[in-house]
Amino acid sequence: MKSLLLASFLLCAPLAPECLVTIHHDPDTQSLSVVCLLNLHDLNTVIMDMSGEDPQLGTATETSDADTLIKQYLQRHLHLSFGDSALHMAYLGHKEDVSLMICRLQVDSVPTAEGLTVSSDLFGSLYQDQVIDVKVETKEGVETHPLYQNENSFTFGMQNK
């Protein structure tokens, strides 16, 4: 009976939703295109915690400053760098897709993605076991690495060096 109760609890226990951050390097334009797929409800919650206002993301009554609030949250919780040099991500906008928020950013003047470090604690204030899957796409291939609360930074393109 105890094992049945434990199994029921584990099946019903809330799991931290995964986040997906995809970074595509375009060697022709020397830029990075960053796409974040984020849980809409969770994004709304962390923005309310950060700003004190309900942006009502993904609804007909979404506030006019939703883009500004999303941009601020992403700037605080998602960082790209090469060595000690932080990269500036320009926020391009967002759109809703069912229960996901798709946020787009861009970084210019990036000749290569080799050695790109991604650091993130997206939704870390909501979930201790948050997993952020980061995928870097280049003409050489795709490299994916999960980020966790206790390991929230990874340098891509360095696995063979």
Image: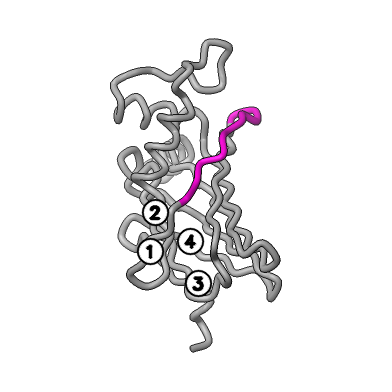
* Residue on which disc 1 sits: 153
Circle 2 residues within 10 Å: few <14, some 14–19, many ≥20: many
Q: Nearer the viewer, residue 10 or 58?
A: 58
Residue sitting nearer the eye, 151 or 114: 114
Magenta segment boundaries in residue numbering: 89-99
Disc on the earlier residue, 3 or 2: 2
Where disc 4 sits, the SS reads: strand
The amino acid sitting under disc 3 is Phe
| Residue 117 versus residue 92 in the image, above or below | below
Name the foreground residue: 5 vs 148: 148
First-in-chain label (4 vs 2)? 2
Q: Residue at x 38, y 45 (%)?
A: 75
- Say whether disc 4 or disc 1 marks the residue closer to the N-terminus: 4
Query: Is residue 117 magenta-colored?
Result: no
Determine the CA span between mark 4 and mark 3.
Answer: 11 Å
Q: Is residue 95 magenta?
A: yes
Q: Earlier in the sequence, mark 4 or mark 3?
A: 4
Picture quadrant of residue 14: top left
Q: Amino acid at mark 2?
A: Ser
The disc at residue 61 is none
Q: Which residue carries the number 4 mark? A: 146
Is 125 or 2 nearer to us in this picture? 125
